[in-house]
Image (cartoon, rainbow, N blue to C red):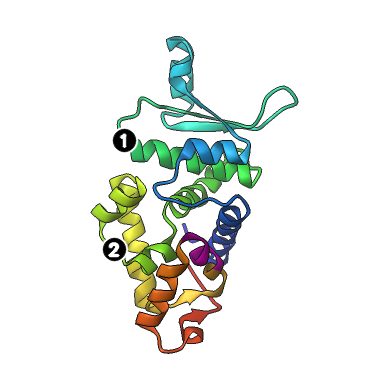
């Protein structure tokens, strides 16, 4: 299904602001620490009796998000017995998108966006460009993504370079300076004669 590029831009800007507001850095991200920082309870299926965990799996074999109430904080339940660690991590950040945007986690129309949110949060594309990370194995080892998500991230990097080269979008600059200012400055010096030539305003997925 076609998704307007502006929608992805809006999601990326929200993620970047979260990184900056909550001083998030260091890869691979610690999903438990991020959830705690954002005020979200994170509960594995295995915390419950087997019959309850089975009901959770029937609801979703990966995980789901429940909005907070007066009695309980917003909560992400996830299947911690799923084989792929990367898939577990992506599930958690997928569900975080529903929390951040105050969405119903059962709204299937939002799932593509939530998958993108999870991948970009775990593995920001401009950071890959600055650090010259462009193979599936390097993405997996540095960011803890599943193989499928890592392939998708590498594809995003490739497509972006085809369209924009190694230029950086203006709204990404604060994120890159926050994550690794020295590496960002070296990247600019090595790739562009003038820094302003490296920064462009428009963007797309």
Residue drawn at x 46%, y 10% as measured from the top left: 49
Pinpoint residue 104: horizontal percent, then vertical percent: 62, 38
As drawn, 103 above or below 191: above
Residue 178 painted magenta: yes
Residue drawn at x 30%, y 30% as measured from the top left: 83
Would you say the magenta stretch is mainly helix, strand or loop? helix
- Label 1 secondary element: loop
Characterize the local packing of mark 1: few (<14), some (14-19) or many (20 or more) Cα atoms within 10 angstroms: few
Residue 205 at least partly seen:
no
Quarter location, residue 84: top left
Query: Marks 1 and 2, Cα distance to the nearest angstrom?
Result: 22 Å
Q: Residue furthest right?
A: 70
Q: Earlier in the sequence, mark 1 or mark 2?
A: 1
As drawn, 178 above or below 188: above
Q: Identify the disc placed on residue 176.
A: none
Of the pair 191 and 106, the residue shown nearer to us:
191
Pinpoint residue 29: horizontal percent, then vertical percent: 44, 45
Magenta residues span 174-179
Labels 1, 2: front one: 2
Does residue 25 appear to the left or right of 157 in the view shown?
A: right
As drawn, 195 above or below 55: below
Q: Identify the disc placed on residue 134.
A: 2
Give the residue at mark 1: 84
Residue 197 painted magenta: no
Does residue 43 appear to the left or right of 155 in the view shown?
A: right
Residue 14 at least partly seen:
yes
């Amino acid at each position: 299904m076609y998704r307007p590029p502006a929608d992805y831009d809006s999601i990326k800007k929200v993620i970047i602001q979260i990184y900056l507001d909550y001083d998030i850095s260091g890869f691979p991200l610690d999903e438990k620490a991020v959830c705690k920082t954002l005020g979200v309870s994170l509960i594995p299926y295995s915390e419950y009796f087997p019959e309850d965990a089975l009901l959770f799996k029937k609801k979703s074999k990966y995980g789901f998000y429940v909005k907070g109430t007066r009695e309980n904080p917003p909560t992400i339940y996830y299947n911690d017995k799923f084989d792929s660690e990367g898939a577990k991590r992506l599930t958690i950040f997928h569900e975080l998108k529903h929390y951040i945007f105050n969405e119903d986690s059962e709204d299937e129309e939002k799932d593509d966006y939530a998958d993108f949110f999870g991948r970009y949060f775990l593995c920001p594309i401009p950071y890959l460009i600055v650090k010259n990370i462009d193979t599936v194995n390097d993405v997996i080892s540095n960011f803890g993504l599943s193989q499928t998500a890592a392939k998708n991230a590498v594809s995003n990097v490739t497509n972006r370079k085809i369209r924009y080269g190694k230029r950086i979008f203006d709204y990404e600059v604060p994120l890159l300076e926050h994550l690794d200012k020295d590496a960002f400055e070296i990247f600019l010096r090595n790739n562009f004669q003038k820094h302003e030539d490296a920064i462009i305003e428009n963007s797309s997925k």
